[in-house]
Amino acid sequence: MSLLDGKTILVTGIANRWSIASGIAHRLHEHGARLILTYQGDRVEDAVREHARALGDAALLPCDVTSDDSLRALAANAGAIDGLIHSIAFVKKEDLSGKVYDTSRDGFALAMDISAYSLITLVGHLKDNFNDGASIAALTYLGSSQIVPNYNIAGIAKAALEASVRYLAFDLGERGIRVNAISAGPISTASSRQVAGFSSMPAKVAAAAPLKRKISSEDVGNCAVYLMSDLSSQVTADVHFVDGGYHAMGMYADPARP
């Protein structure tokens, strides 16, 4: 069953085949979506171009969310779209360990600009590209609302991103445009490995979560397919967890005890 036939979806944030956005793009393609992929800079262009070929020769457009000129060019070339996947975040590596109160002023500003404001400005520049009834989904993480050691300023930026989702949902609701967030469990990507201590997180989360298994980018992609499809036509302003139920745990059972 193809849930996305006839829909055009713009996907940001693919850096390589391990990116969460890559898993999402493949699931969207499998359900019939026409994709537009963006890339930021020459460093990742070849990898994203390779993805584009594997995804039905998806369109490819440059996008630097820190540049209004780049965003204006994106809007001018994207055409009409039915969905947007926002999978963009950046925090200086030194701000992903140590104490939050040691975060530099420019480090805070950079994290908020790229990880949170980028959704606002993307939507602002693309507002006339969205067809009525379109869907927007942004990638977030549990560290937005709970303490995850070393996630630090990234968690604060994700909290701002989730607040942005709610306010954008209100602003766009009169056009039937839905805005949601997907909170993925820990998945090994180039970005996540920058967080000190990340290597042990997927196994720990899987052991504690009700479903007892690790999360994959394809799992996140399944949620994205639902949110991009008409099946979620009355779903907006919410955070959808894809973490095996880990977010609901208040106390973890001792695996050594029956």
Image (cartoon, helix red, strand yellow):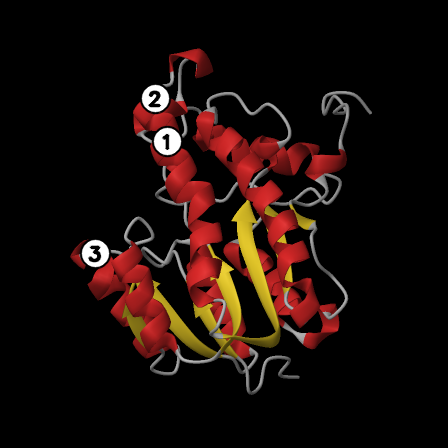
Q: Work out whether residue 193 can be spotted.
A: yes
Circle 3 SS class:
loop
User: Residue 197: image x %, image y %?
Assistant: 44, 24
Q: Earlier in the sequence, mark 3 or mark 2?
A: 3
Name the residue that disc number 2 marks: 105
In this view, the mark in front (3 or 1): 1
Q: Work out whether residue 63 can be spotted.
A: no
Q: Residue at x 73, y 42 (%)?
A: 245
User: Residue 164: image x %, image y %?
Assistant: 57, 46
User: Residue 84: image x %, image y %?
Assistant: 50, 65
Circle 2 SS class:
helix
Which residue, as the protein is rendered here, is positioned at the far right?
A: 258
Q: Which mark is residue 161?
A: none
Q: Residues within 10 Å of mark 2 (few under 14, many from 20)?
A: few
Judge from the rendering whether residue 252 lies leftward or rightward of residue 48; answer left or right: right
Amino acid beneath label 3: Gly
**Is 116 rendered above or below residue 181?**
above
Q: Residues within 10 Å of mark 1 (few under 14, many from 20)?
A: some
As measured in the structure, the alpha-carbon distance from the residue carrying label 3 to the one carrying label 2 is 25 Å
Judge from the rendering whether residue 187 lies leftward or rightward of residue 98; answer left or right: right
User: Is the C-beta separation of discs 1 and 2 under 8 Å?
Assistant: yes
Q: Earlier in the sequence, mark 3 or mark 1?
A: 3
Q: Residue at x 51, y 55 (%)?
A: 217
Q: Quadrant of the rendered structure where residue 233 is?
A: bottom right
Name the residue that disc number 1 marks: 109
Circle 1 SS class:
helix
Name the residue that disc number 3 marks: 41
